[in-house]
């Protein structure tokens, strides 16, 4: 199943985003709970109406951090992602979450890991109660981010019973993309993109490294989700039609690997 991230069309109402599924030929959406048109009122009932188009859920990350030194931020992060677990449960879809980061631009310390584990324990317990499946995404390779390295991602995933959303962009920049083939049984969602000179998510179809990896993971028998994740800032100004066309081209490229 080929999905695309709703945040690529963040500026449009839900009906236009749903229309883009049809126009691009994709199978559905990875629905970010922070999609603005939904986030305004957070009425889950609206999602029931488009459930057939939603293939996966992405948790809340904007302005949030479970490892923050500001406890108000920690509490907000917990609250918003318990809400995301509830959505995933009600729609019967998998949920991708992110790890946290040290508040200072320095390497994480033990206190950051302790905070992250508290966060993961609560989400794990609630997801078990709600019968929802959680996937942990590998983080951007920035100095203060947790769960950016393969070993740490796998360690936390196994400890808490999470699956993995593998972000190819992040792993390529971190230099450990190929290691994930050793844990392919944990991967349930692939975020597919390359990156521009600023590291932003951009077109995958012109990157030979992405092509090679997709062939390799296909040969393992991977049958999980494939999600097109793009950042319009890497393209410049784009109309709705431009975005749909880019999704269509990426979908046509990705169909070779399923």
Image (spheres, helix red, strand yellow):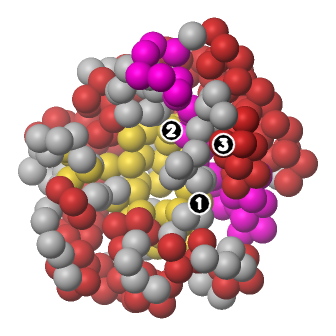
Residue 176, visible in the rendered structure: yes
Give percent across and percent down for residue 31: 53, 66
Viewer-nearest of discs 3 and 1: 3
Report the span colored magenta. 82-108
Determine the image quadrant of residue 75.
top right
Q: CA distance from mark 3 to mark 1?
A: 22 Å
Give percent across and percent down for residue 172: 26, 30
Q: Which numbered disc flags the more N-terminal residue, 1 or 2?
A: 1
Label 3 SS: helix
What residue lies at 66% left-to-right and 42% top-to-bottom?
73
Residue that mark 2 sits on = 137
Q: Quadrant of the C terminus?
A: bottom left
Label 1 SS: strand
Residue 135, visible in the rendered structure: no
Q: Which numbered circle lies on residue 34? A: none
As displayed, is residue 233 above or below residue 24?
above
């Amino acid at each position: 199943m080929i999905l695309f991230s709703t945040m690529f069309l963040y500026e449009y109402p839900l009906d236009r985003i749903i229309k883009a599924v049809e126009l691009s030929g994709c199978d559905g959406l990875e629905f970010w709970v922070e999609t603005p048109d939904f986030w305004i009122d957070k009425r889950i009932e609206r999602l029931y109406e488009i459930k057939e188009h939603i293939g996966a859920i992405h948790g809340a990350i904007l302005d949030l951090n479970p490892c923050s030194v500001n406890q108000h931020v920690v509490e907000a992060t917990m609250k918003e992602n318990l809400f995301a677990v509830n959505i995933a449960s009600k729609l019967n879809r998998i949920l991708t979450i992110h790890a946290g980061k040290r508040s200072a631009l320095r390497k994480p310390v033990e206190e950051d890991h302790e905070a992250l584990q508290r966060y993961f324990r609560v989400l794990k317990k609630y997801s078990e109660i709600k019968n929802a499946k959680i996937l942990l995404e590998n983080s951007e390779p920035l100095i203060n981010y947790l769960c950016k390295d393969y070993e740490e991602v796998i360690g936390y995933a196994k400890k808490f019973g999470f699956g993995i959303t593998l972000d190819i962009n992040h792993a390529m920049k971190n230099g450990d993309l190929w290691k994930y083939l050793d844990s392919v049984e944990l991967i349930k969602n692939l975020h597919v993109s390359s990156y521009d000179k600023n590291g932003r998510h951009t077109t995958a179809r012109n990157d030979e490294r992405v092509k090679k990896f997709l062939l390799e993971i296909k040969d393992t028998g991977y049958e999980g989700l494939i999600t097109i994740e793009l950042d319009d800032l890497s393209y410049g100004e784009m109309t709705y039609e431009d975005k749909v066309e880019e999704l269509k081209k990426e979908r046509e490229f990705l169909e070779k690997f399923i």
